[in-house]
């Protein structure tokens, strides 16, 4: 009989804007820091990790985070994103 493996998938979504790291999955505007963790390696301390079970949930989380990204109009784009975003998937 084959063994069934179960996985837990967690997502975090951050932005780097003007050299400031912020969590895109919360409404809090606190600044986060990069840290070295002996178990996980380099990580962003204090960012949200949301457990997800399906691709639809992942897309919903991406939409929430994208709405929270810093945006500012430019001459060529009215809603240009002014930040770099990082989606981290932990399995």
Image (cartoon, rainbow, N blue to C red):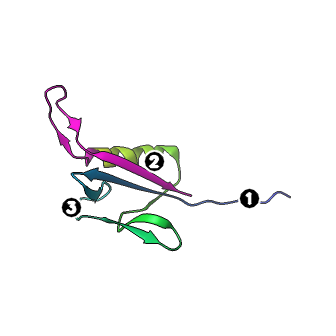
Q: Residues within 10 Å of mark 2 (few under 14, many from 20)?
A: some
Q: Which mark is residue 29?
A: 3
Q: Which mark is residue 15?
A: none
Q: Nearer the viewer, mark 3 or mark 1?
A: 3
Could you say whether the residue bearing mark 2 is in a helix, strand or loop?
A: helix
- Between 23 and 32, the one lying in front of the other is 32
Q: Is residue 57 above or below residue 29?
A: above
Q: Which residue is mark 1?
A: 4
Q: Is residue 66 above or below residue 14?
A: above
- Residue 81 in percent (x, y) is at 24, 39
| Among the 4 quarters of the image, the one containing residue 46 | bottom left
**Residue occupying the point 20% across, 34% down:** 79
How much space separates mark 1 and mark 2, taking CA atoms?
23 Å
Precedes in sequence: disc 3 or disc 1: 1
Is 85 one of the magenta-colored residues?
yes
- Residue 40 in percent (x, y) is at 51, 68
Q: How many marks?
A: 3
Precedes in sequence: disc 2 or disc 3: 3
Q: Which residue is mark 2?
A: 58
Is 14 one of the magenta-colored residues?
no
| Among the 4 quarters of the image, the one containing residue 47 | bottom left
């Amino acid at each position: 009989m084959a063994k069934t493996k179960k996985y837990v998938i967690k997502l975090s979504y951050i932005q780097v804007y003007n050299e400031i790291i912020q969590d895109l999955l919360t409404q809090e505007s606190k600044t986060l820091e990069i840290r070295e963790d002996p178990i996980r390696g380099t990580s962003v301390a204090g960012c949200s990790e949301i457990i997800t079970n399906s691709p639809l949930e992942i897309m919903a989380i991406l939409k929430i985070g994208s709405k929270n990204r810093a945006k500012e109009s430019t001459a060529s784009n009215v809603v240009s994103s002014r930040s770099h975003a990082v989606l981290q998937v932990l399995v």
